[in-house]
């Protein structure tokens, strides 16, 4: 099987970020994986917490402030850097976002499925709340069968494997620089390339939606302010 590179982009949300890092680093894997945390101009509290976590756990910490002056979010740069490193190491790439807690077996299962599933491009672990109920952004998968379900719907970047085959086929430097989030674009491109995307409904991960983008929670509590920020301030370009 291919090697595994794992990344976590971080923008504040220190409590969930530390849970994410601990869960990834405590994964039970048959082979060693490379874990990189990308700090995207977080506040001082988060930076200090990341430096302390680095002393406890085995991961590489990259501060984007040492690479670019482009304001956050810098998800495109993170994807490009991670793609290059994964291809150089002939590895799959797993994104575990900073509001996700993986199970001890999650990464091992994803690595195995990427090897077994036909033409695998993106494998998304279904997300759940603390009651183990499927939650955003996989609400559409609540009635899916149990297993690896091929889908034409987008795969979200909560906890997702991007296969080495996809990384080799599609250069992330071709992504639209006018956008800030890229799960939709890459999901569609994978299908255009004749590859297949899968939702892993039997490999759930805990998800705390929008912890690093709390303004998105306004959709339920203050929809007027939510849509003002979304469309007028253009805080989300997918």
Image (cartoon, grey):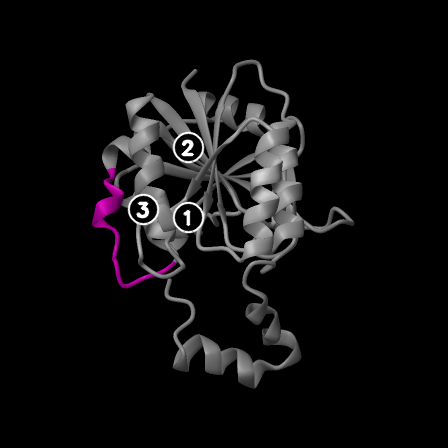
Determine which of the numbered discs, if any, sits on residue 67 in the image.
3
Q: Earlier in the sequence, mark 1 or mark 2?
A: 2
The residue at which mark 2 appears reads as 93
Q: In this rendering, which labeled residue sits more in front, label 3 or label 1?
A: 3
Q: Earlier in the sequence, mark 3 or mark 1?
A: 3
Residue at x 40%, y 78% (from the top left corner): 233
Crowding around mark 1 (Cα neighbors within 10 Å: few <14, some 14 to 19, many 20+) is some
Residue at x 29%, y 47% (from the top left corner): 189
Q: Position of residue 172 (x, y in %)?
A: 27, 44
As measured in the structure, the alpha-carbon distance from the residue carrying label 3 to the one carrying label 1 is 36 Å
Residue at x 67%, y 33% (from the top left corner): 103
As measured in the structure, the alpha-carbon distance from the residue carrying label 3 to the one carrying label 2 is 21 Å
Does any portion of residue 142 appear in the rendered image?
no
**Along the horizontal axis of the image, is 193 left or right of 21?**
left
| Residue 26, image quadrant | top right
Residue at x 42%, y 67% (from the top left corner): 236
Residue 17 drawn in magenta: no
Which element carries disc 2, helix, strand or loop?
A: strand
Picture mark count = 3
Determine which of the numbered discs, if any, sits on residue 152 in the image.
1
């Amino acid at each position: 099987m291919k090697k595994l590179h794992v990344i976590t982009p971080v923008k504040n949300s220190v409590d969930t970020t530390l849970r994410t890092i601990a869960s990834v680093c405590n994964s039970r894997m048959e082979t060693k994986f490379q874990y990189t945390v990308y700090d995207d101009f977080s506040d001082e509290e988060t930076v200090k917490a990341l430096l302390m976590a680095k002393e406890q756990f085995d991961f590489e910490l990259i501060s984007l402030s040492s690479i670019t002056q482009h304001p956050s979010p810098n998800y495109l740069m993170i994807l490009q850097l991670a793609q290059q490193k994964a291809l150089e190491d002939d590895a799959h790439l797993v994104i575990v976002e900073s509001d996700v807690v993986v199970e001890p077996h999650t990464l091992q299962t994803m690595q195995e499925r990427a090897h077994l599933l036909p033409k695998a491009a993106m494998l998304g672990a279904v997300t759940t709340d603390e009651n183990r109920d499927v939650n955003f952004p996989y609400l559409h998968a609540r009635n899916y069968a149990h297993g690896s379900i091929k889908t034409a719907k987008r795969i979200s970047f909560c906890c997702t494997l991007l296969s080495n085959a996809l990384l080799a086929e599609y250069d992330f430097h071709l992504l639209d620089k006018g956008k800030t989030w890229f799960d939709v674009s890459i999901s569609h491109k994978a299908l255009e390339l004749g590859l297949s995307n899968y939702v892993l409904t039997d490999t759930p991960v805990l998800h705390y939606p929008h912890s690093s983008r709390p303004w998105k929670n306004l959709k339920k509590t203050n929809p007027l302010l939510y849509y003002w920020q979304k469309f007028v301030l253009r805080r989300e370009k997918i």
